[in-house]
């Protein structure tokens, strides 16, 4: 399994913003994934220790990147760990 880490500089980590600050961002991430025109309903997002973690399964590496781009584009997402598996 390939795990990718992405970090954006200049944005405070979610953990620095306070314990309850991750819930709205996780909800916004789920909403973006569900509203996408792509089949990303099996992708889950959670926040652990200030890191957003994407997990689940998709049918292509392209969809893995689409999911990552949708979530990493949210303001406040500083560190993203992409653990999405591609079904072969």
Image (tube, rainbow, N blue to C red):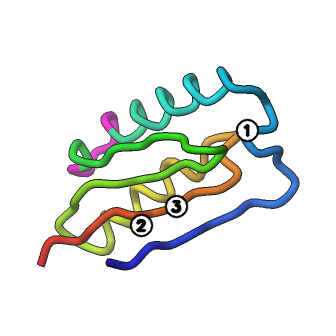
Q: Nearer the viewer, mark 1 or mark 2?
A: 1
Q: Residue at x 50, y 33 (%)?
A: 26
Q: Residue at x 79, y 31 (%)?
A: 17
Q: Please tell me whether the stretch drawn in magenta is mainly helix, strand or loop.
A: loop
Q: Are marks 2 and 3 in contact (CB under 8 Å)?
A: no
Q: Which residue is mark 1?
A: 15
* Quadrant of the rendered image containing residue 49: top right
Compared to residue 8, the image places residue 75 above or below, namely above
Q: Residue at x 65, y 56 (%)?
A: 79
Residue 81 has which mark? 3
Q: Quadrant of the C terminus?
A: bottom left
Whole-Å distance between the Cαs marked 1 and 2?
A: 25 Å
* Quadrant of the rendered image containing residue 48: top right
Tell which residue pokes out farthest to the left in this image.
88
Q: Nearer the viewer, mark 1 or mark 3?
A: 1
Residue 65 has which mark? 2
Which structural element holds mark 1?
helix
Q: In the image shown, does 87 or 38 lie closer to the viewer?
A: 87
**Percent of width and height locating residue 13:** 76, 45
The answer to which of marks 2 and 3 sits earlier in the sequence is: 2
Whole-Å distance between the Cαs marked 2 and 3?
A: 12 Å
Query: How many residues crowd mark 1 within 10 Å: few (<14), some (14–19), many (20+)?
Result: some
The answer to which of marks 1 and 2 sits earlier in the sequence is: 1
Start and end of the magenta stretch? 34-39
């Amino acid at each position: 399994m390939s795990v990718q880490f992405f970090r954006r500089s200049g944005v405070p980590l979610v953990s620095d913003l306070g314990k309850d600050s991750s819930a709205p961002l996780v909800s916004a991430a789920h909403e973006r994934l569900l509203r996408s025109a792509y089949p990303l309903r099996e992708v889950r997002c959670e926040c652990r220790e200030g890191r957003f973690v994407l997990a689940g399964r998709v049918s292509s590496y392209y969809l893995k990147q689409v999911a990552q781009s949708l979530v990493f584009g949210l303001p406040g997402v500083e560190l993203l760990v992409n653990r999405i598996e591609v079904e072969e």
